[in-house]
Amino acid sequence: MDLLTKDLLINFLFILLTLFLVQMVYLIKYAYRLEEIKKWVIGIFPVVSLILCMLLPVALEKGFVWDLRWIPFILGGLIGGFRLGILQLLLVLVIRYYQGHDVGFYVTAITFIFIGLLVFFLSKYYLQMNIKQKVALSIALIIFALFSSLFVSIHIFGVSLDSIFWVKYVTIHIIGMFISTLLWEVIQTNFQVLQKLVKAEKLQIVSHLAASISHEVRNPLTVSRGFIQMLYEGEATQARKEYANIALQELDRATEVINDYLTFAKPAFDIEENININEEVQHAVNIIIPLANMNGIQVKLSAVDHYYVAKGDRKKFQQCLINIMKNGIESMSNHGEIKIHLNYENSMIHINIQDEGIGMTQEQIDRLGEPFFTTKEKGTGLGMMVSFSIIKEMNGNIHVTSEHGEGTCFSIILPVYSVIDRMTQDNHFTKMG
Ligand code: ADP
Ligand code: MG
C-alpha cells in the first residue's frame, strides 16, 4: 500500500474515533441522567474529526492539502444543520488559510461555501429520511463535492492532477462516507432502542407494584378520610380544624395517586364497550371546567356534525382525557384557552387538545409517559403514563407537538368503529371486527 493511501486511512481513523467518542458521551449522559449534557454534543463528532483531519493531512504538495475533511463537513452539516454548518465552514477556512495562502485555499473557499449552502438546504429534509435515503444522499453529496473541487481546480485554476491518486482519493471518500453515515445511524438507533427498553422495563415493574398494593391502601384511606371529616365538622378548636383540614388535603392527594395507579393496574377482566367519543369528550370538559375557571382558563370545544364510536373501557378513557386536560390547565398560569376539536380522517378520530401553556422541550416530550417523570413540584408523574397505556390498549396512539413557551397539542388518535350523522342519526358505516 502506498504512503498516500495509508495516510488517508489514518485520517479515516480520526473520523471513526470521534464517532465512538460521541457514543460514549451519549451512554454517559443516559446512564447518569446528566441533563446538562445537551443535544449539541453531537457537534463534537464532526468538529473534532474535521480539525484532526485538517491538522494531520496526507501530504502538502503542489499547493494542495489532501485529507478527508469533506466527510465530517458534509455529515455534520446534514445532522447539525445551520449553526454547526457555519462553525465548520469557518473552521475549514481559518485552518486552511494558515496552511498556506495558495491555489488550494481558493479552491477550498469556493467549493466549501458552495457545497456548504447546498448541505444547509438539504439538512432540513435529511432528518426525516430513512437510512437508505440518508446513505444515498450523503454519498451523492460527497461525489458531487469532490468533482466540483476537481472541476474548480482544473478549469478555473488550471491545475493538473495525478489521475491514479484522484481515483483512490474518491474511492476512499465514498467508502468512508458510507461507513460513517451508517455508523452514525446505528449509534442513534442503538441509543433509542436502549431508551425504549429501559422505559418498558420500568413500566412493567410499576404495574406489578400497582396491582398488588393499590387496593389494600385505598380502603383504609377512605375510612380515615370519613373520620377526619367528622372531626373537622364537629366541635373543635380553630387549631384542630386547621390540622384536620391539612390531613384531609393530604389524604385526598394520596387518593389521587392511588387512583392513577388503580386505573393503570390491569383489571381482572377487560371491559370493551362502545364509546361515543363526542359524549365522553363533552363529559370530560364538563368535569374539568370548574378547575379551569378557578384558574381563569377558558375551555372551548368545537362542534362537529357526526358522532364517532370507538371501543374500549369508558371509565379509563375518561381518565385519560381528564389527565391530559388537567396537564393543559396546569401548564398555563392564570389565563389562556384550551381548545379541543375532533378531526376525522381515514377511519381514525383525532382528538386534539391544544393549550397555550409553557410547552415542552423535545427531551421532555421523549420522556413523556415514563413512570414518575414530572417537572412539577407536587406532580406524581403518573398521569401521562396511565393515559398512554390506556390509549395503547385501545389500539390508538398519542401524538404530542409542543413549542417551548407557546403551548402544547396532544392528539389522541383512535380507530373509529362507526360514524353516525348527528342530524339524521344515520349510521354511515360500520367497521367489521
Ligand atoms: P404530573 O402532571 O403529575 O407532573 P404527568 O404524567 O401528568 O405528571 O405529566 C408529566 C410531565 O409532562 C409534567 O410534569 C409536565 O412537565 C409535562 N407535561 C404534560 N402535559 C403538559 C402540557 N400540556 N404542557 C406542558 N407540559 C406538560
Ligand atoms: Mg398530570
Image (tube, rainbow, N blue to C red):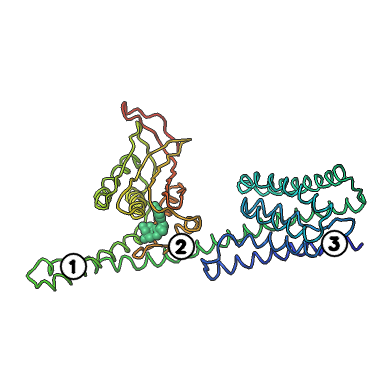
Q: Earlier in the sequence, mark 3 or mark 1?
A: 3
Q: Earlier in the sequence, mark 1 or mark 2?
A: 2
Instruction: Please name the residue that numbered disc 1 is placed on.
Output: 245
Q: Assess mark 3: CB under 8 A from ligand 1?
A: no
Instruction: Please name the residue that numbered disc 3 is placed on.
Output: 58
Mark 1 Cα within 10 Å, few/some/many (few <14, many 20+)?
Answer: some
Amino acid at dot 2: Leu
Residue at 65% over, 47% down: 120
Q: Disc 3 and disc 1: Cα gap in Å?
A: 78 Å
Indicate which quadrant contains ligand 1.
bottom left
- Residue 111 image offset from top left, x and y in percent: 76, 47
Q: Quadrant of residue 185?
A: bottom right
Amino acid at dot 3: Val
Q: Quadrant of the C terminus?
A: top left
Q: Quadrant of the N terminus?
A: bottom right
Residue at 34% over, 50% down: 325
- Residue 80 image offset from top left, x and y in percent: 63, 54
The nearer-to-camera label among 3 and 1 is 3
Residue nearest the observer in this picture, 187 or 40:
40
Q: Disc 1 and disc 2: Cα gap in Å?
A: 34 Å
The nearer-to-camera label among 2 and 3 is 3
Q: Residue furthest top?
A: 424
The nearer-to-camera label among 1 and 2 is 1
Q: Is 225 on the left or on the right of 236, as rendered?
A: right
Mark 2 Cα within 10 Å, few/some/many (few <14, many 20+)?
Answer: some
Q: Disc 2 and disc 3: Cα gap in Å?
A: 53 Å
- Residue 81 image offset from top left, x and y in percent: 62, 51
Please report contact status of discs 3 and 1: CB closer than 8 Å, yes or no.
Answer: no
Residue nearest the observer in this picture, 53 or 2:
53
Q: Secondary structure at mark 1?
A: helix
Does residue 211 appear in the picture of this structure? yes
